[in-house]
Amino acid sequence: MKERFVHLHNHTEYSFGRGILRIGDWSREPSEFLKAAVSEGMPAVAITDRGNLYGAIEFYLACRRAGINPIIGCEMSVAQDNRYLTVLSRDFEGYQNLMALSSEASLEGCGTPCINKELLAEHAKGLIVLSGCLEGVLCPTLPSGDMDGACRLAMEYRDILEEGCFFIELMDHGMEQERQVLKGLLEVHKRTGIPLVATNDNHYLHKADAAAQDALLCISAGKLISDDDRPRMGSSEFYFKTPQEMAKLFGYSPEALANTVSIAEMCHLEIPFSQLHLPDFLVPEWQTQDTYLETICREELALLGLTGNEDYEKRLAFELGVIRRMGYSGYFLIVWDFISYAKRNGIPVGPGRGASAGSLVAFTLGITAIDPIRYKLLYERFMNPDRKSMPDIDIDFSPAGREKVVEYIRGKYGSDRVAAIITFGARKARLAIREVGRAMGIKATEIDKLSGLIPYGPGNTLAKAMREIPQFAEATRSGQAKELYDLASRLEGLKSCAGVHAAGIAITKEAVWKHSPLVKSASGVVTTQYDGECLPMLGMLKMDLLSLRSLDIIVEATRLVRERCDKGFELAKVPMDDAMTYELLASGQTPGVFQLDSEGMQALLRRIKPSCFEDISAAIALYRPGPMEAGILDLFIGRKHGKHVDYGHLKLESILKDTYGIIIYQEQVMEIAKSLADFTPGEADMLRKAMGKKISEDMEKFRGHFIDGAKKNGVGSEVAVRIFNQIEKYGGYSFNKSHTVAYGMIGYQMAYLKANYPAEFAAALPCLRKPLH
């Protein structure tokens, strides 16, 4: 009969410098760690990283995908005892209490996050607590024989918690000190009746991973593997043992083994992902958020002189309908409010960033300054009308102004409801080689030589280098270099540190810690413990408020123009076909011009010779490695300067005319799918996502859908196949047009100032030589 057992003590990669259990693999599928739990028939598995809940949501979702029950926990330090407890959440109330404990420990603790017994008692509901590892709360008194003290302490924790929720934790990693403590723990159990539970302090998956984890300890401590005073685990038994191995270790205590399953059965956490937790935005009492948003939009549409224009009226009604249906009116009002604050207080605001420039609602509210209809931008690129997902509006402010806007948001909604957002650094291939090489004591010149063979950039893994770079494969074939490669491969890709997102803030209806635990960064900034990918899933409002120095330059140059040349000058009203501006751009004389000032871009502008704003937008979209390597850039330049333009089908001419028959933008892919094959806006957006992620299975499904839809519109199969192949070939390199138009607008305005008011522009530049990206 197969042994029944559940691992309740696991340190993942989020136990920085200690744990190397991965939650997800390279493709974000459940990791070998979780697959091992499933294959061993475990009904559940726990995460118990030391001092944090960083990986909780990633772990929860990965477990659900793997078909196993996630138990969210944390190894916590207790201030009075200067020792650790293993704390698990039974249910949602326990999970919220765990987040409260983790937040309090991180924000109030000095150095190592720690709680105290009073705080534990205050947040005890829904928690299960185990007495911890060799550094656990009961262990210090046992070697000296103070059994009475150990029993008193155990009963104190038992009484703090709900009935049946404190367990004496047994571990055996083959260390003599641990076995001495085990005898004492069994005696405490005998005297107090507190139940036992068997765990393994898992830090890695296989026994063979012990050397890699050992190297990680040295890397974290800045020590060599050969140093006598370096940190050590004490044995190589801290791996994910099978139920049979655990039964062999703890055969003398069937209760301790059975209680792992009993505890797992007590834990049934359901984290709600479908609820929104936007802060309350107060509207006039005779209005709802929906009606108030529409009122503002229609008033602003009238001020723009567009009331009655069928295209704008129809688009506005469509967008407002989607926003109402998804419950996001409050979201747009919140953003409108703080941008209005910025403009009232003279804080420079960018014209737009990312897909939000495709929204007419955002344009009428003044969130963006880009007319999406004029520039053929798609709303569904911003918000898919068929799938409910939180909108993502990124906004640029001047550096000094950004901080004022953040303070305004804190003041309006409450400082406890606003937090910065955490980011996680991962150990990439070159860094893994360097760190492990240093820990092994290998000469710096040898490390540099080996790591230098690995190209920079995403996707360049050690395995890829081994496959594709013969010199690297030869260099790591044997000896010390092979050992270095083997160790580095086991550490590559692991999370290695936490930081603060440069622009992101989270805003919630209640205190942030009720939805994400908090932590104080090394620089003293309070951040969420969950990253920006998790927060919208939890219904939290995530905003990226970015600093853009070019906005300060534009404001200063405009001030100088008004002071010295033209009192009534308004940059927003300059002509978009100014001859002097396009002469400047065609000459490549663009140092100091946002997005267009690098040497490579200057050379590209001299080749393209932009003659309209669409050429500027296209240049920004094309100046990337993918389009350049695929020959799309050269094709664009050739067609612009007279080579034959082939649209592939008459229906594509209006979509591809501005880019000379070439698919440059994601929006063009979406328009082709809608126009030729009757895709809905939502389906077109899903095609765009599958294309960008190069998901072959999804692309094949869309291929059939596209060809069938095209046939119904009178397009022959051969033509439809050729067009879809073109979408696959060029569409994979396509870019977000909303973003290039918005950033192209900043570039055009700066080029206009430089061409028409060169002295004022130069005086506004803080440094002519420093790139302004």
Image (cartoon, rainbow, N blue to C red):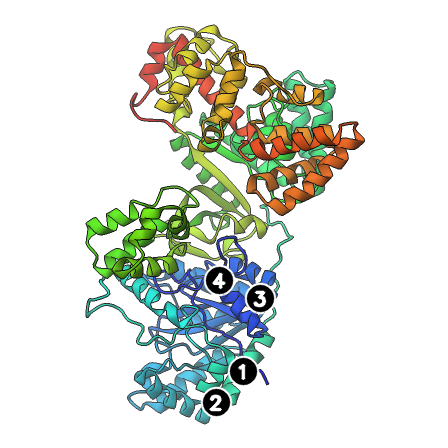
Looking at the image, residue 285 lies above or below residue 254: above
Looking at the image, residue 283 lies above or below residue 749: below
| Residue 93 numbered mark, or none | 3
Question: What amino acid is found at the position of numbered circle 3 in the picture?
Answer: Glu
- Between 550 and 748, the one nearer to me in the picture: 748
Question: What amino acid is found at the position of numbered circle 4 in the picture?
Answer: Ala
In this rendering, the label closer to the viewer, 2 or 4: 2
- Between 772 and 526, the one nearer to me in the picture: 772
**Crowding at mark 4 (Cα within 10 Å: few <14, some 14-19, many 20+):** many
Q: Secondary structure at mark 3?
A: helix
Q: Quadrant of residue 125?
A: bottom right
Q: Are marks 3 and 2 in contact (CB under 8 Å)?
A: no
Q: Give the CA distance from mark 1 to mark 4.
A: 27 Å
x, y percent for residue 609: 46, 13
Q: Secondary structure at mark 2?
A: loop
x, y percent for residue 201: 41, 74
Q: Residue sitting at 37 percent across and 82 percent down?
A: 138
In this rendering, the label closer to the viewer, 1 or 2: 2
Residue picked out by circle 4: 100
Q: Give the CA distance from mark 1 to mark 3.
A: 22 Å
Residue picked out by circle 1: 259
Looking at the image, residue 687 lies above or below residue 49: above
x, y percent for residue 385: 69, 38
Q: Secondary structure at mark 1?
A: helix
In this rendering, the label closer to the viewer, 3 or 2: 2
Q: Give the CA distance from mark 3 to mark 2.
A: 35 Å
